Image (tube, rainbow, N blue to C red):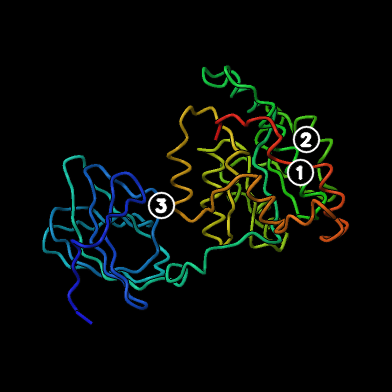
């Protein structure tokens, strides 16, 4: 094997605006050529281990406990994996940097076989409340949209959860002002579903909710709700940090923000699995034979199919993710 690493032959990858890298993997080790653009600041605290050298430019390493260290061209550094303080790179508007990093490859990054598949999930419904629905309708982009296809999908999600026995949890922000569930969703709320009021945007910022999610006993979570770029975003990042596989139902998300694409990219870059309710339905169903004989998948699916219908026949969902 040629020991030389030719970065010229490797493609650039850009997980977020303002940062790109080329990676060479061998076994459990990785070498990355990393570039930061002016003004870039990592959005999340990193706890991975790195050893490296600043090839060009300068940046600041900021730690969660407030400690900061300046790195400039020629500096060599080492950060232990699992540092509970966490760290992030911060660059001024007049700074850019190119680094060479040496890292251990996390098991999830070593094989495409580790990509999570959907099975036995729980459902986490975040702030689907009349107040937020009205807030979207009051915006310039929301006023032009029919929200009923979106609400239909929330209804179908809860029907699926009830019929298939998925543990379900809903959060509510300031229900005295925003209300509880829309009436149509109240009618299909799963027996045994749990409801929690939250003050923090991140649902995991409430210990009671964090414990309730843990008590559901499911690693995989179907996540839906509002707002995509605030409560959903912050909750998804925390759920991923806690080891959950998050399946993000992008046709069951909404927000007052006209262009939430950055929030979706950030969640996916952090490890959320993008999909739709249709995607989830068919991944759980697994076989077309059920349409000829629902009994092949048991009584739960026999009950679900006539209530759920064929997703292809639903009204087109509005681009509210």
| Circle 3 or circle 1, nearest the eye | 1
Q: Which mark is residue 123?
A: none
Q: Quadrant of residue 293?
A: bottom right
- Circles 1 and 2 in contact, beta carbons < 8 Å: yes
Q: Which residue is mark 2?
A: 185
Nearer the N terminus, badge 3 or badge 1?
3
Residue nearer the viewer, 254 or 199: 254
Q: Quadrant of residue 296?
A: bottom right
Nearer the N terminus, badge 3 or badge 2?
3
Q: Which mark is residue 158?
A: 1
Residue nearer the viewer, 180 or 22: 22
Q: Quadrant of the C terminus?
A: top right
Nearer the N terminus, badge 1 or badge 2?
1
| Circle 3 or circle 2, nearest the eye | 2
SS label for mark 1: helix
Task: Indicate left or right for 310 with 98 as reference.
Answer: right
Q: Which mark is residue 44?
A: 3
SS label for mark 2: helix
Q: Residue at the location (65% across, 37% down)? A: 127
């Amino acid at each position: 094997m040629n020991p030389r690493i030719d970065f010229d032959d490797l493609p650039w990858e850009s997980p977020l605006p303002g940062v790109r890298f080329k990676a060479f993997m061998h076994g459990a080790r990785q070498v990355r050529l990393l570039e930061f653009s002016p003004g870039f600041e990592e959005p999340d605290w990193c706890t991975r281990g790195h050893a490296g050298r600043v090839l060009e430019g300068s940046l600041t390493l900021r730690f969660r406990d407030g400690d900061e260290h300046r790195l400039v061209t020629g500096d060599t550094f080492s950060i232990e994996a699992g540092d509970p303080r966490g760290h992030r790179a911060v660059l001024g508007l007049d700074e850019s940097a190119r680094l060479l990093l040496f890292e251990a490859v996390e098991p999830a990054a070593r094989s495409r076989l580790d990509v999570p598949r959907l099975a036995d999930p729980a459902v986490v419904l975040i702030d689907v409340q009349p107040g937020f629905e009205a807030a979207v309708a009051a915006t310039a982009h929301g006023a032009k949209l029919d929200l009923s296809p979106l609400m239909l999908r929330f209804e179908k999600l809860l029907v699926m959860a009830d019929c298939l026995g998925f543990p379900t949890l809903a959060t509510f922000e300031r229900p005295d002002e925003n209300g509880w569930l829309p009436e149509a969703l109240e009618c299909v709320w799963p027996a045994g579903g749990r409801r929690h009021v939250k003050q923090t945007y991140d649902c995991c910022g409430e210990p009671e909710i964090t414990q309730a999610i843990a008590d559901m006993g499911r690693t995989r979570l179907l996540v839906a709700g509002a707002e995509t770029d605030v409560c959903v975003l912050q909750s998804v990042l925390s759920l991923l940090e806690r080891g959950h596989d998050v399946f993000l139902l992008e046709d069951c998300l909404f927000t007052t923000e006209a262009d939430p694409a950055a929030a979706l990219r950030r969640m996916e870059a952090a490890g959320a699995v993008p999909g739709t309710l249709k995607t989830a339905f068919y991944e759980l169903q697994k076989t077309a034979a059920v349409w000829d004989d629902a009994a092949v998948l048991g009584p739960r699916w026999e009950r679900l199919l006539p209530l759920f219908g064929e997703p292809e026949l639903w009204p087109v969902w509005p681009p509210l993710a």
